[in-house]
Image (tube, rainbow, N blue to C red):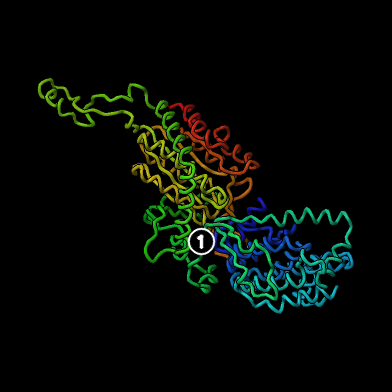
Amino acid sequence: MNSKLRNENIVWTVSEDYSVVPALNLFDEYDNEDLQFYRMMLLGQVYKDVNMEKLLEYLSITIPKTGLKNAFLKLVEIYLDDCFSENLLRNRPGAKEYREKFYREIEKKYSTCDFEKMTVEEEIEFVYSSRIIGKYVVIRDVTDEMIGFMRKRNNERDTDEIIKVLNACFLKYFYKNYRNSNSNDAEFELLKIEEAKSENELKEDVEKEKQRLNFKMKKKHIEKFNPKDLIGEVSIESAEFTKAIDEDKIVRDERADDSQAKSNRAECSKGEMEKMVESRYGEAIYPQFILENIEKDISTGIHEGIKLHITEGNFLKGKYDPYFAKAIDNQREVNYEYYKDNELIFRRSINELKEVIRKKFISDEEDEDSFSNSGRLIPSRVWRNRFLNDDKIFVKNNCFEMESITVDILLDVSASQLEREEYVAAQAYIIAEALTSLNIPTRVAGFCNFFNYLVVTQYRDYKDPRGKNTNIFKFRASGSNRDGLAFKYISNQMNLREEENKILIVLSDGKPNDKINLGVRSFPNVDAQDYEGDIAIKDTAQEIFNLKMLNRNVLGIFTGEEEDLEYEKKIYGKDFAYIKDLNRFSRTIGYFLQQINF
C-alpha cells in the first residue's frame, strides 16, 4: 500500500475528519510500520483536539528563526505526545500497546549509541523515551532541563495554551535573535552540540530539514494569527505575525462536545453508523429495502460487507452535523468562485463541446425544424388533418430528441482530491452543461467511502432541469474510495435505463484505496476487506472491462498527479484523457465522443 495514503487514512480515521490534508511531516517518519502507525494515530488525535491551522502557522513563522529547526520540531512532537496521548488511549485503548512498543524501541535504538555524537534532536527523543518507559537518563544538563520544562506543562489542552508553552520554550532554548549577537546560554550550548558534527552529517540534516519543513496546508483553512495571544516571557518581534495569511475564513467546528459517544465508537450499532453517515453526507433518497437489494447484487467478493448510502446531499432538520453541512456550503462557494473567475474560458469550452456533440449525434437535417405527428401544435395546419387526413400538424426540432443516448458522469470525491476540488467541479460542470443544453439525459454523481459505506452523492438525475447542474459545485472531497464498487453500482443503475447507447465519463485520480481495518481495538468493527494496492487496481480495471463488455462507452478523465498516470493506464487502457490545459478540455472530450460508434 502507498505509505502516504496509509498514513493519511490513519490520521483521518482517528481525527474523524476527512476534510484536511494532514501535515504528515510534522512528525518524523519511521521505517518500522508499528512505530509509524502509532505516530500517525497520535497525529490524528492532535488534529482532533488542536486547531492545526493556527499551530502550523505558528511553526512556519517560528522555525526560520532558529538554527536548530529539526530539534525544535522534535520537541514539538514529544510535547504533543505528552499532552494528547492520554486522550488517544482513552478513545482508542488499542493504541496503548503501540505506544509502549514505540518508546521501548526508541530507547533501545539509542541506548547503544555514542552519546557524545548524538544530535540535539536525538538527545531529545532518547531522553523523553527513557522517561516514558521509567528510566532516568541524563546526557547533557541543557536537554534534561528542557524536557523537564516541557513535562511540567503537559496538562495543557487548549491550542493557544499549547502555543504559549512552545513559544516560551522556543525563546528560552532556540530563538536566534538576529539583532543581538549575544545568544542566550542555553541556545549557545545546543548550537555547540550541532556544530560538533561532521560535514557529511550536516549535509544530511539540510536535506532532512527541507523534507520536514515542507508543510502542506490548505490556505483556505488558515485564519489570521495574532501574536498578542501569546503570553510568553518575551514576544517574538516579527512583522510576519501581523500580516494576513489568507482572506478565506477557517471552517470552524461547531459540533457539540460529545466525547463519550465518540469514545464508544467501536460499539456503535448498525443503526448508529447509518445515522453517522447520514449526518455527514445527507439523508438517503432510497428506502432501506431498495438499498439492500442493490447491495445483494454488487457487494460481493472483495466488496462483501460494504453498505450503500445514496444521497442528494440534503440534510434533515435535527439530523445532521452542522460542521459538515457548513463545510459543504463553504466548499460550494469556493468551487463556484473559481468557476466565475475563469468563466470566459469555461463558457467557451461549453459551447465548443456542445457543437462537437451536436455534429456527432445530430445530422444537419435533424437539426432543422420538421413537421411531425407529435411535438408543438401548429394551429395553421390543423385544417390539413381534417380535410387532407394529414397528421403532421406538429413541429419538432430533433436537436432536442436524444432519447437513444444517456450519459453518466461519475466523480471521485475521496480525500485524495482535496487539492483539486475546484478544478474537478469545473470540469464536471462543463461536460454536464454541454450535454444538458442539448437535452441529452445526463446524470452526475460523486462517490467516496466512509468506513464500510459506499456513499454516492447524486448532484443531478437524468430528467432534472438544466439548472440542477449548479449542484455539482457542492463537490467536496472526503473519505476513501472503492472505485470498483462504485463502477458496479453505476453499471447496475445504467442497466435500468432503456436507451440503447450509454456513455460513462469518470473523473478520478486513478488511485483506488480504502483501508478500513486498521488493526487497532476501539476502531469501529467493520466486517469488510481492505481495498488497496494491486488488488484494488486489478478489481477496478476488471469493472471497467465489464462495462465495456456490456457495450458501455467509458472515458476516464485523469485528475491526479503525473506520477500516478500508470495506474490510470492500467484501469482504462487507451480510453483516458489527461488534460493539463483547460483551453484544450472541450477538444479532448470532443475527440473521445467523435470516436464512439453506436
Q: Amino acid at mark 1?
A: Val
Q: Residue extending furthest top?
A: 388
Quarter placement of the C terminus: top left
The quadrant in which residue 516 appears is bottom right
Q: Residue extending furthest left?
A: 387
Sort mark 1 into few (<14), some (14-19) or many (20+) by Cα contacts within 10 Å.
some
Q: Secondary structure at mark 1?
A: loop
Is 212 on the left-hand or right-hand side of 552? right
Label 1 belongs to which residue? 251
Q: Name above or below for residue 206 compared with residue 43.
A: above
Residue drawn 89% across the image and 67% down it: 116
Q: Name above or below for residue 344 compared with residue 372.
A: below
Residue drawn 59% across the image and 62% down it: 53
Q: Name above or below for residue 181 compared with residue 331.
A: below
Q: Residue extending furthest front?
A: 179
Q: Position of residue 502 (x, y in %)?
A: 42, 35
Is 9 on the left-hand or right-hand side of 404? right
Residue drawn 52% across the image and 44% down it: 423
Q: Position of residue 341 (x, y in %)?
A: 48, 44
The quadrant in which residue 433 appears is top left
Q: Is residue 270 visible from the viewing direction of this image?
A: no
Q: Position of residue 429 (x, y in %)?
A: 44, 42
Q: Is residue 198 visible from the viewing direction of this image?
A: yes
User: How many numbered discs, if any?
Assistant: 1
Q: Position of residue 418 (x, y in %)?
A: 56, 51
Looking at the picture, tell me which residue is in the foreground, 377 or 165: 165
